[in-house]
Image: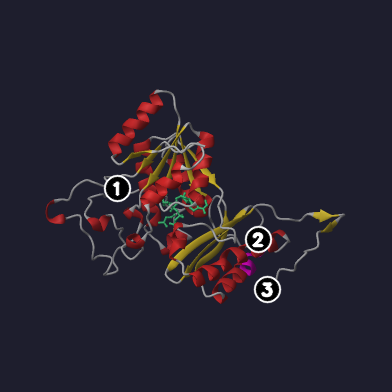
Amino acid sequence: MTAKDPLIIRDKDEMTKWSRFMKAQGSTIGLVPTMGYLHEGHISLVKEAQKHADLIVVSIYVNPGQFSPNEDLSTYPSNFEGDIDKLRSVHGGVDVVFNPFNLYDYGVGEGGETMKRGEEEKGEKVISCVESSKFGHETWIRVENLEKGLCGKSRPIFFKGVATVVAKLFNIVEPDVAVFGKKDYQQWRIIRRMVRDLDFGIKIIGSELVREHDGLAMSSRNVHLSPQEREKALSISRSLYEAKKAAENGERYCTKLRNYVAQTIQKAGGKVDYDEIVDQESLENVEVIQRPVVFCIAAWFGNVRLIDNMEINSLLFTKTKGKRRKQEKKVAIS
Ligand SMILES: Nc1ncnc2c1ncn2[C@@H]1O[C@H](COP(=O)(O)OP(=O)(O)OP(=O)(O)O)[C@@H](O)[C@H]1O
Ligand SMILES: CC(C)(CO)[C@@H](O)C(=O)[O-]
Ligand code: BAL
């Protein structure tokens, strides 16, 4: 297998020029938006994109617009050279890495009048790092209902920042297809809704969540976990698996399942931000499972906030010779 060096494009106008040129030659373009510090979860998105498009663009950009000033923008991990090495060795390769330097580069008004930092300290308004950085950006996309729950509660500007930067990337790269990971389940749903509501004409693909060998959901932020915190964080995926199994074996009451997961994570030393069972499409809370749902979790281990989720698609009322299949291992979730 020969390694392929991706072309690195840093200027947004050049990115658009490249895409338009390639499309004029008849090629289709698949976009994989990332914030870098790539792992196998990201690579799985690239492989998925390869199935749907001729040419692949991976964007690497830590978007200040989705971080509040009190969040971890300044410590978000990065390793650009390492990322390029990883992409170089993907079978079939990546054509472009778009690593923009001028995504919000509009200059600063006289007297820095776009500076709003301070308001959030008075508790009046939550603003994003992009607003407090004097970039002059003031246009935002909100996906009003889907962004309200789950991560939207504890990160109130997160999804407006994500939807806006993704819309910018779509306008710059002009892809035919874009791939998002179901690890960020709410994000994937929000992007799909935005694309539908604003007629982007881009196919959005949700790619399966990739886990470490021991079940931990892969995430760039895992690098900040100490070995002890990492071990404790396994309580998330383990309890989710148990809850899924219990649901499949007939436990439909969400309160029971949620309490079990929350208690397991707390016992392991984690601090639960939310644990909710929601409808896969509307992301609205479900009390009794009667249709496909997704069990979504966010929890803190030390200073690291992790998210994970598990879809529960089929309620296993499988019958063996007329009887409900006996649970091999009784799942204690009372
Ligand atoms: N384990 C994973 N499985 C599938 N997709 C993933 C996984 N981790 C990240 N992705 C997807 O990769 C894309 C880029 O995500 P991002 O660069 O923020 O990585 P991340 O690992 O989610 O980082 P973090 O959660 O620490 O911010 C998103 O669409 C995200 O859902
Ligand atoms: C979609 C995204 C690249 C937007 O900054 C980011 O939220 C991410 O990496 O999931
Ligand atoms: N993958 C989500 C990016 C973030 O947490 O900011």
Residue at the right extreme, as displayed: 321
Q: Residue at x 37, y 53 (%)?
A: 79
Q: Which residues fall within the magenta stretch?
A: 252-257
Tell me, yes or no, whether the highlighted magenta stretch contains residue 255: yes
Image coordinates of residue 210 in percent, x first then y, are 55, 53
Q: Viewed as shown, does residue 217 lie left or right of 134? A: right
Residue 244, numbered label: 2
Asked if the beta carbon under badge 1 is closer than 8 A to the nearest atom of ligand 2, the reply is no
- Residue that numbered label 1 is attached to: 139
> For numbered disc 1, what is the local secondary structure?
loop
As shown in the figure, which amino acid type bears the numbered disc 3? Ser
Asked whether 128 or 79 is in front, the reply is 79
Dominant secondary-structure state across the stretch colored magenta: helix
- Between tags 3 and 2, which lies in front? 2
Sequence-wise, the earlier of marks 3 and 2 is 2
Q: Which residue is mark 3?
A: 334
* Residue 174 disc label: none
Q: CA distance from mark 3 to mark 2?
A: 14 Å
Q: Is residue 6 magenta?
A: no
